[in-house]
Amino acid sequence: MLNFAIDALIFDVDGTLAETEELHRICFNRAFAEAGLPWSWSVAQYRRLLTTTGGRERILRWIEEVEPERAARLAGPEDPFVRALHARKTELYAEGVRAGEVALCPGIPELLAQARALGIRLAIATTTSRANVEALLDAHPTALPREWFATMVCGEDTVRKKPDPEVYRIALARLGVGPVRALAVEDSKNGVLAAKGAGLAVVAIPSLYTRGDDLGPFDLLLASAAELIPLIGR
Ligand code: XBP
Ligand code: MG
């Protein structure tokens, strides 16, 4: 049991609700290839690039690294060139998710069902695009019924992405819950920093892409969401 009763559980999406990052990587690479660009991110490169949250921001960082002259001509992550690449990547990704190419993280269906049974409210706080979250919920209607989530705060809803706490502050405000009555679940250091910045306690559960990373100032480290189930009783 936690040493406080919780009214809400706030979940990150990528790497926390589902193992999404490999499909994200593949779809970035497909979008680059379709655009005739000679870029293809390896698993090791993508692991490094993941420290930049947000797909457009990640693309821009890459261009700054490999083609600084092109980057100097771009108007930041919202430049039309970056936006077009990212829009195509989002289309490809949503198609893949709807085709069942993304698995939920172990223990997530059981944890969500138990939280619901206990009357704990559920929310999403993610830097990923809303279309990606919608696709994930559509692909898993039994484990992730849309109506179970009191609010979903996505990349489009914030000015600053994680590690900035904005996404968690918005989620708490929409829930009408104070940070001491809620718990965040995250898989990455940027996510842990964002939740801690909003005053939340954070459970860190490493994902395939963050296993072995320094996950920052978490309160509790678990191996899977299943391990959280006996701790949320009230
Ligand atoms: C996830 C991200 C996202 C996804 C890609 O971080 O950083 O950018 O990798 O999604 P977190 P978009 O799990 O901490 O929310 O391409 O839609 O940005
Ligand atoms: Mg994550």
Image (tube, helix red, strand yellow):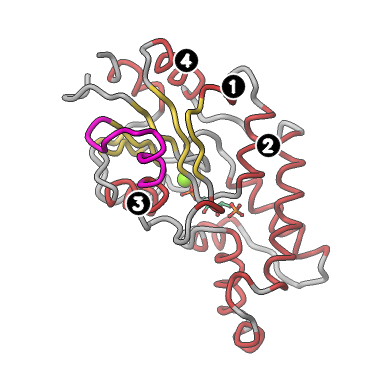
| Residue for point 59% across, 59% down | 55
Quarter-of-image position of residue 104: top right
Q: Is residue 170 above or below residue 64?
A: above
* Residue highlighted by disc 1: 145
Quick one: label 2 or label 4, which is nearer the N terminus? 4
Quick one: label 1 or label 2, which is nearer the N terminus? 2
User: Chief secondary structure of the magenta span?
Assistant: helix
Distance between mark 2 and mark 3 Cα atoms: 24 Å
Quick one: label 4 or label 3, which is nearer the N terminus? 4
| Residue for point 21% across, 24% down | 2
Percent coordinates x, y for residue 191 in the rendering = 39, 49
Q: Secondary structure at mark 1?
A: loop
Q: Residue furthest left?
A: 3
> Label 2 neighbourhood size at 10 Å, few (<14), some (14-19), many (20+)?
some
Q: Is residue 224 above or below residue 113?
A: below
Instruction: Give the residues drawn in magenta, as a range.
Output: 169-181
* Residue highlighted by disc 3: 194
Percent coordinates x, y for residue 138 in the rendering = 68, 29
Task: Name the mark on residue 135.
Answer: 2
Q: Is residue 175 magenta?
A: yes
| Three-letter amino acid code at the position of disc 3 | Ala
Name the one closer to the observer, 156 or 48: 156
* Residue highlighted by disc 4: 113
Task: Name the mark on residue 3.
Answer: none
Instruction: Indicate which label's residue lies in the foreground, 4 or 1.
Output: 1
| Three-letter amino acid code at the position of disc 1 | Pro
